[in-house]
Image (cartoon, rainbow, N blue to C red):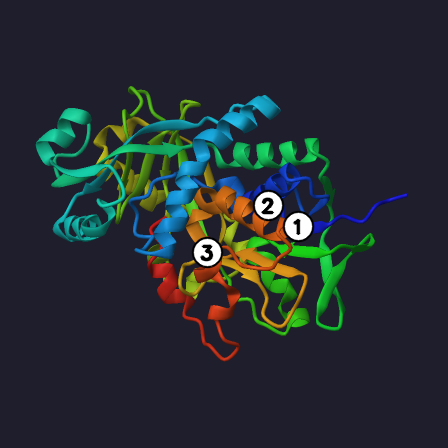
Amino acid sequence: MAVNPDVIVVGAGVIGCSVAYYLTKQGAKVTLLERESIGSGASAHATGSLSLLGAEFSPGPSFNFALAAHREFPGLVRDLEEETGMDLLFQQRPSLRLALDEEEEATIKGLMAWQEEHVAMRWIDAAEVMRIEPRLTNKVRGAVYEEQSAQLDSYRLTLALGQAAEKRGAQLQLRPVTDLITSGSRIIGVRTAAGEIACDTVILAAGVWSTAFSETLGYQIPVQALKGERLMLRFPGEPLPVLISSPKRGHMISRLDGMLSVGSTGGRDYDQQDLFLGDEFDRQPTESARTELLQRAIDVLPALEDAELVQQLAGSRPLSPDTFPIIGPMTGWEGVILATGHGTKGVHLGPVTGRTLAEYVMAGCVQVPELLEAFSPARFSAESDPDFYAAGQRAEE
């Protein structure tokens, strides 16, 4: 006889798999529901960069959450690799955040004013940048040198989280959730194409598809799909000794599998009418993005003229109107929690989201943890008119 789970997690991307992983570590019975396959959304094409230096994080709760997430990874990766036998291609290296023009230098130094209180970093001049990586363009004005950044394969991370959760008893079912089941003001389960499943708590971690439940909840979940594309290149030279990024030109990372990741497109790279055309459009790689990303990469590292394009990835990232994730219980409802809107930082913030929500659920959903207070869905009123275009312009990756 089937036993109803304690928690149903809707969505098996990095957020949903992280939630399932940490809940099962604490002994919860979990069912993980996914409409396609593990990591088939944003988690499949994410860069996996774990840097703290970008403009996506701001002083206060945003950065505190990111810092807690950053500290989570070394131990988590070790545990997951031991439990699953998977190599997550995790690397910890210094990073350079390059300035190639005056505007980038001003942006980077403006962020440094508060970031350097929390991160081991320093400004270095062009000469020192070139000593670290002589193949870079001579247009470099300087860079922030971060003593330790990190990167991993986001798809492997998601698979490992899901597999480890299954090893602890989580039930993965590949079927779409068609609706939530309500009893008064309480969510008591979900409805799928194969039938109904009852539970105590439902966690909606379906990324851009979380909005499908807005009508049932009487609350327009404020998430929009933000298109992103990146490239995988085969570069004949030596791997880059550092992880590289710049505000206008995105990232350039030598992965442990020998590929060079270049990207990504963000909101600044699309006209307003093209930015939010929906998931089916977002999954289609475009020639314009390929040309733009290759040109950016060559501008930074001219030797990439000789690189071979191996793969172009495209997909949607779940963007919130203020670029903060949306995590926490729904006002006016019991038994339902949102975990979406992580934008371009879902991989970075996924595990800490999972751990913090697991602690909240296992404590009886009584008091929202301090780490999550700023991310409550309640910060968006039903009457608000979200400006996703402005939020998309602030997304660097």
The image shows residue 179 at horizontal and vertical percentages of 73, 62
Which residue, given by chain and number where applicable, does mark 1 sit on? Answer: 9
The image shows residue 137 at horizontal and vertical percentages of 16, 34
Which residue, given by chain and number where applicable, does mark 3 sit on? Answer: 370
Of tags 3 and 2, the one toward the viewer is: 3
Quick check: marks 1 and 2 in contact, CB under 8 Å?
A: yes
Q: Label 3 to label 1, Cα distance in Å?
A: 22 Å
Describe residue 248's horizontal placement relative to residue 192 as left or right.
left
Q: Which label was assigned to residue 19?
A: 2
Q: Secondary structure at mark 1?
A: strand
Q: Which label was assigned to residue 40?
A: none
What residue sits 47% from the left and 32% below the top? 153
> Where 84 falls versus 200 (above or below)?
above
Which amino acid lies under the numbered mark 2 shown in the image of this protein?
Val
Question: Which badge, 1 or 2, comes first in the chain's sequence?
Answer: 1
Of tags 3 and 1, the one toward the viewer is: 3
Which amino acid lies under the numbered mark 3 shown in the image of this protein?
Glu
Describe residue 113's horizontal placement relative to residue 392 as left or right.
left
Which amino acid lies under the numbered mark 1 shown in the image of this protein?
Val
The image shows residue 253 at horizontal and vertical percentages of 34, 32
